[in-house]
Image: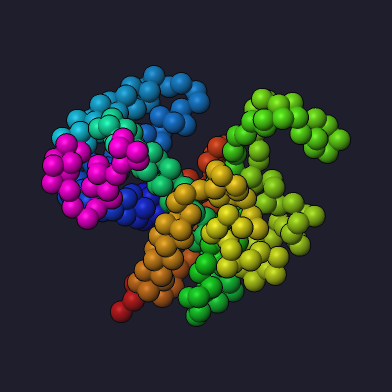
Amino acid sequence: MGQYATRFPINVIVDMLGLDRADHGRFHVWYTSMIDFLGNLSQDPEIAAAGLRTRDELAAYMIPIIQDRRAHPGDDLLSVLCTAEIDGTRMSDEDIKAFVSLLLAAGGETTDKAIAGLFRNLLAHPEQLAAVREDRTLIPAAFAETLRFTPPVHMIFRQPCEDVEVSGGTIPAGATVTCLIGAANRDESRYADPDTFNIFRADLTTGSAFSAAADHLAFALGRHFCVGALLAKTEVEVGVNDLLDAFPTMAFAGGEVPAESGVFTRGPGSLRVRLTRRA
């Protein structure tokens, strides 16, 4: 996880923003601190203090760069954020810094779990891994099935604007509803053999799996559909291809399928793999 699955999306985000690649390591430290802070359900004071330090350190790093990029824009994402305007209004330095924090948290935490989950699922089904290795056009199907079978985000919150009838009960307007994506994606009335990982299943449409017309709910739906879905698809396709190209064989180092962990976001905490390097 720490050597590949997490590093890949964070490096991509830093590079998209046009920031110094020499600072990749700093961003990984900040990212880890941010994710620990957001998941600090036990209110550990040390984790909370580290999260607040990260907030201050990231602001001290980003604000001068944002101000310079306003004066000297380039062709990177940060320059686009600095120069974009709607009806004559531009984002403030603080807005842009906060957006960078959101990119790191939302774009890193979900994609690293997706990459790890995909390999966990394929390694647990060697015949499907062999098929993907032989035909790389199956990677999107493997990713789509991973999003259904082991979605990185398991909960999403909604508030209905009017009363809604569901399964014989009523959800009142304004109530906060915790929707369990992981459960919905295992709905036996929607998917055949839902508790089985199968990249060849006929009831999951790969072509629409990364759009608002997706058959699964891992990216949510409607106006709150994940804006980073296509970026995640590209990252996963490149990341998986690169790893398969570099290592012609791979298997679980311990021989057992690693367990998932997490409540709001979920995935393998550790994924130790024995790799054979290509000659």
Residue at image coords 59%, 38%? 156
Q: With respect to residue 98, does 274 lie above or below?
A: below
Residue reaching furthest front?
Answer: 87
- The answer to whether residue 108 is seen in the rendering is yes
The C terminus sits in image quarter = bottom left
User: Does 83 appear in magenta?
Assistant: yes
x, y percent for residue 90: 29, 36
Position in image of residue 20 (x %, y %): 18, 49
Judged left or right of residue 114, residue 55 is: left
The residue at 13%/42% (across/down) is: 71
- In front: 37, or 130? 37
Indicate the quadrant where residue 196 lies.
Answer: bottom right
Residue at position x 34%, y 76% in the image: 278
Q: Is 170 on the left-hand or right-hand side of 124?
A: right
In the rendering, at what x and y percent does residue 269 appear?
48, 45
**Segment colored magenta:** 65-89
In the picture shown, does residue 50 fall above or below 103? above
* Coordinates of residue 206 in the picture (x, y in percent): 59, 67
Quarter residue 49 falls in: top left
Residue at image point 35% right, 40% down: 86
- For residue 198, say whether it is visible: no
On screen, residue 6 versus residue 17, left or right, reads: right
Residue 70 part of the magenta-drawn span = yes
